[in-house]
Amino acid sequence: MHPQFYDLIQKLGEKTGVPVVLNTRLSIQGEPVVESPKDAIRCYFSTGLDALAIGNFMLSKS
């Protein structure tokens, strides 16, 4: 069991009414797949992503 992931899904459900997290390949078109937290943060700030969760940390543009 992964309590942090469960909590993330539950809080997302409370906020949006849809308790689902879709885990897909993270990359920008024409760029290689994200392979590190540094890559993920760069991708996050250069795209239209609303939020990014990495381990115990959550980034949100709102």
Image: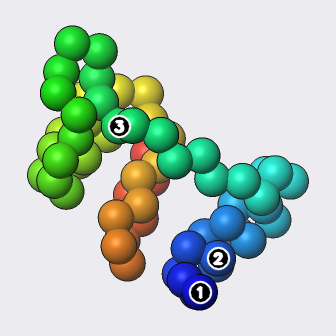
- Secondary structure of the residue carrying numbered label 2: helix
Relative depth, front residue between 29 and 60? 29
Residue at 16% across / 53% down in the picture? 36
Amino acid marked by disc 2: Tyr
Amino acid carrying mark 3 in the image: Leu
Alpha carbons under labels 2 and 3: distance apart: 21 Å
In the image, residue 38 lies at what x, y percent? 13, 52
- The residue to which callout 3 is attached is 26
- Disc number for residue 1: 1
Left or right? Give the position of 46 relative to 26: left
Going 43% across and 27% down the picture, which residue do you hit? 48
Q: As displayed, is residue 19 above or below residue 46?
A: below
Badge 1 element: loop
Q: Amino acid at mark 1?
A: Met
Residue at the spot 29% in from the left edge and 15% down from the top edge: 29
Relative to 47, say whether 45 is above or below.
below
Q: 10 Å neighbourhood of mark 3: few (<14), some, or many (≥20)?
A: some
> Which residue lies under the disc numbered 2?
6
Query: Residue 30 appears at what percent x and percent y?
Result: 21, 13
User: 10 Å neighbourhood of mark 2: few (<14), some, or many (≥20)?
Assistant: few
Horizontally, residue 24 falls left or right of residue 57, namely right
